[in-house]
Amino acid sequence: MKHSRLLVVGLVFLGMCGCAPFPVPGDWPVAMDPDRDTASEFVEEVRGVDSVSDLTKQEWALLNFLSDNDRINEAIGKADDYGTHSWKIAEIYRVDPGREVSVLCEEGHRQEPIYFRYSPENKVWYRVGDFETPDVKAYPAVIVK
């Protein structure tokens, strides 16, 4: 009974991923610590913050998540003109500090945004298609430890 329930949940999740307007990597959600040392390389790309001390615990966890470039390339899911995945983070913008973060990625001359919304109720960053649509589907990306 327990295994069949897990199978049904897995199939529902796979079905949701197939309907997502963006790639949802199979290893999401990823549990992350708010480790300042690992994420410090991205502090310079963060906009909407006066000092590092303004970043919240959940934002540090998201920065740790974003520090894995393979994860960024999987999240975008698009290859460049040469068939490779070489997306890099150009800018991280705190739209609503501690709640909404927009990540602008670039590859050569092409740019692609990735949007994340934080849920304090379950301590999870969700990837969303945009911030404008109130009932937009959300997919768990980062579990804040």
Image (tube, grey):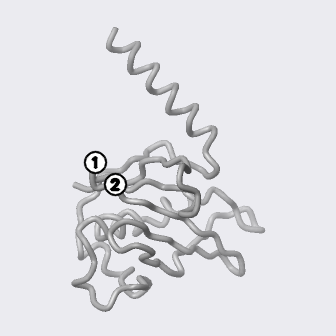
Task: Tell me: 89 left or right of 32.
Answer: right
Q: Could you say which disc has been placed on residue 141 in the image? A: none
Q: Indicate the secondary structure of the residue bearing disc 2.
A: strand
Quadrant location of the N terminus?
top left
Residue at 26% of width from left, 85% of height from top?
A: 52
Q: Quadrant of residue 73?
A: bottom right
* Residue bearing mark 2: 119
Task: Tell me: 28 left or right of 77.
Answer: left
Task: Tell me: 31 left or right of 103.
Answer: left
Work out which residue is located at the far bottom of the displayed protein and give it. 50
Disc 2 and disc 1 in contact, CB within 8 angstroms: yes
Using the image as rendered, state which of residue 13 and residue 68 is in the foreground: 13
Quadrant location of the C terminus?
bottom left
Identified by mark 2, the residue type is Ser
Q: Quadrant of residue 20?
A: top right
Provide residue 102's location: percent of width, then percent of height.
50, 71
Provide residue 100's location: percent of width, then percent of height.
42, 67
Q: Indicate the secondary structure of the residue bearing disc 1.
A: loop
Residue at 44% of width from left, 84% of height from top?
A: 45
Q: Residues within 10 Å of mark 1 (few under 14, many from 20)?
A: few
Provide residue 117's location: percent of width, then percent of height.
42, 60
Q: Residues within 10 Å of mark 2 (few under 14, many from 20)?
A: some
Task: Tell me: 9 left or right of 129.
Answer: left
Question: How many tags in the picture?
Answer: 2
Work out which residue is located at the far front of the displayed protein and give it. 134
* Residue bearing mark 1: 122
Residue at 51% of width from left, 27% of height from top?
A: 12
Provide residue 77's location: percent of width, then percent of height.
63, 56
Residue at 43% of width from left, 53% of height from top?
A: 126
Q: Is residue 118 above or below residue 23?
A: below
Using the image as rendered, state which of residue 5 and residue 94 is in the foreground: 94
Q: Is residue 65 above or below residue 45?
A: above
